Image (cartoon, coloured by chain):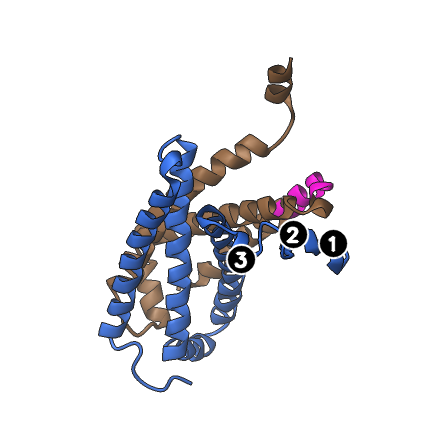
Amino acid sequence: MTENKIATTKTAGSWAWFFQRLSAVLLVVLLAAHIFLDHYDEVGAEITVGWVHARLGELLFIAIDYSMLAMVLFHGLNGTRTVLFDFDMFAKRKKAVDIGLWVLGIAMLVWGIVILWPFIAG
Amino acid sequence: MKIGSFKWLFGRNSEFWPTNMKTGMWAWVGHRLTGLILVVYVFMHLSFLTQASLSHEKFDSLMEVTAQPAFVFMDFLLVCAVIYHAMNGFRVVLFDLGLGIRKQKLVFWVMMAIAAVLVIVGFWVLLDAGLFNGEWL
């Protein structure tokens, strides 16, 4: 019955593993677009509020920035979770660590959305 | 946690002692270190953007700082961390798919060769645009 027990064990483990890979692949695509379009294409440009506002006038750049924010936060904090669980003191408190990281992640996501908004609105 | 309790983890007989580490272990340690650096960077990035969003003057003065060669070099190091993390991450995903596990060392060095090319191209682009010219500090 070992197989059954593993399959039904209530843990965020396999979902965490799967979404870590999914966000990794999405991040490679998003970061490639970000580095190419925002840095390589415009290398040496003088960055002003107007420049940022003009750039964020295009839906593509808003989409890239906000999806990158969400993916980076998930991938980074989920990676931190993996590192933390390698230490005994956190492995014993998985639920608390999970809740803490989710609260931190959602707070930072909302914060990131809010602080970029003035640049979009102008 | 006592300091002594880390001896098994980082001591001379531990798997993390440099001479005890092999390719795969270095890759793993590098992945974690760059990962943690990038997480810290995201916090710094949001904090910088928060300050920059306060006023146009604040934004302009912060952008002046980021245009300094020393700061651009920090950006370059950040890109190096991203490239290493992404390339080694590809290796991890390949292993998850059951590909290349028996040739893990070769896969690591192929990925590092690609990473080296990307790092050199990145450095050249910044150098060519003149971003390392001017006062360093």
Do marks 3 and 2 share a chain? Answer: yes
Determine whether B108 is above or below A122 in the image: above
**Among the two numbered marks 3 and 2 on one chain, the one whose residue lies closer to the N terminus:** 2
Residue at 60% over, 16% down: A3
Q: Magenta residues: mostly which secondary structure?
A: helix
Instruction: Report the disc number at residue B9.
Output: 2
Distance (Cα) linking label 2 and label 1: 8 Å
The residue at which mark 1 appears reads as: B5
Indicate the secondary structure of the residue bearing disc 2. helix
Determine whether B125 is above or below B83 in the image: below
> Is-magenta flag for residue A100?
yes
Instruction: Report the disc number at residue A69.
Output: none
What's the amino acid at mark 1?
Ser
Do marks 1 and 3 share a chain? Answer: yes
Q: Where residue A59 appears, x then y in whole percent?
A: 32, 51
Residue A74 vs residue B110, the one in the foreground: B110
Chain (brown): A
The residue at which mark 3 appears reads as: B18
Q: What are the residue bounds of the magenta stretch?
A: A91-101
Distance (Cα) linking label 1 and label 3: 19 Å
